[in-house]
Image (cartoon, rainbow, N blue to C red):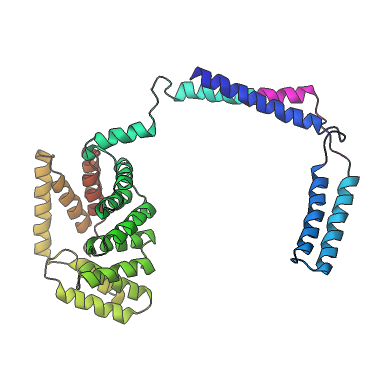
Amino acid sequence: MFLFWVVAGFLAAAAAGLMLLRAARSASPATTADPAQVLYRRQLSEIDDLLDRGLMGEGERKGAHAEAGRRLLAAAGAPAEAWTEGPRARGLVLLAAAAAPALALGLYLVLGAPGVRDQPYAGRLEAWRKSDLNTLTPPEIAAVLRQAVKERPSEAEGYRLLGLAEDASQNPIAALQALRRASELAPERADIWRMLGQAAFAAAGGKMESEAVMAFTRVLALEPGDPAARFYLSQAKAEAGQTSAALADLRALLADMPQGVEGREAVQARIASLEGKPAPVTGDPQELAMIKGMVSSLASKLKANPDDPDGWVRLVRAYAVLGDIAQRDAAYASARARYAQTPAVLQQLDAAARAEPMR
């Protein structure tokens, strides 16, 4: 490490010396050609070449030739700019060049960890591959899967899992690319097309652009009646100004969804939004009180026995649906701290915290 910094300092000083040498040489017009004159002479030659190749007319050549000639004469008549600074200024330049690596070395010794061995990326990747995936962060899992799909490029499932990992790593563009490849390898899998549509929707900032529409249309072709595809395609119609068609699709979807099925409230809320009405409240006051009692009971159980990831996910989602933001955030923070090394649970917690509240 010390040798590295010695060499870096030497190279910095050498670079400063070369700059000073160049500046000193430029002080003498006899030793160095004016770069402006060289440029304009080259322009004159290029103008003639364009004429010879038929890319410029004679009239255009004369005008361009005259302008380049005028600039060449002006540059030739301009006085050369010599290096006017004395030895003190040159010494400051050399001192600054030497001080830069020295300052960097000092900061590294204070803020860095010079005693720690190098950790090449290849070595870290190999260690991650041998580790339990539950102990890795989403970016580490994504790195492992990127290597895996290189080794098995024809397996769609690897790209599907990579898409999930990239999405959990907050890398929507990479997730979209992985899912595109998965859909190419397994065009008959509706689950991959569904994930691709959702990824395209997220990457577009919550807008139904052409790729998302194509993906969900493909889902419906493979699995007619798929609720998610019908919901997102109704969104596309609404964005295109086809509000009546979007409402008709959503009402038909709602009619096909059994009472209590997950997602029904989202469809009702979307219908109300398109109609300009407040979203319907699910359940009467007595039912709401019963739900709050069940949530309170779940919170008590988790307090006594906190090692229950599914319970934490249900609790966070319940608080979110009830609109109890303070309790949701407290439960969410506690659960994330407890399962910080379990990416799958963290992903479920994130989704639960984003659940729409009842209105």
Against 295, is 90 above or below? above
| x and y percentages locating residue 330 in the rendered image | 23, 45
Quadrant of the image for the C terminus? bottom left
Vertical placement of 343 versus 282: above or below? above
Residue 163 pos. (x, y %) = 30, 52
The extreme right residue here reads 77
Give whichever of 347, 186 is nearer the camera. Answer: 186
Left/right placement of residue 73 relative to residue 272 reads right
**Does the rendering let one see residue 209?**
no
In the rendering, at what x and y percent does residue 283 appear? 13, 66
The residue located at (38%, 28%) in the rendering is 119
- In this view, the residue in front, 249 or 19, is 19
Say left or right for 286 vs 246: left
Evaluate whether residue 133 shows in this view: yes
Q: Which residues are magenta?
A: 80-96
Foreground of the two, 314 or 38? 38
Q: Is residue 59 magenta?
A: no
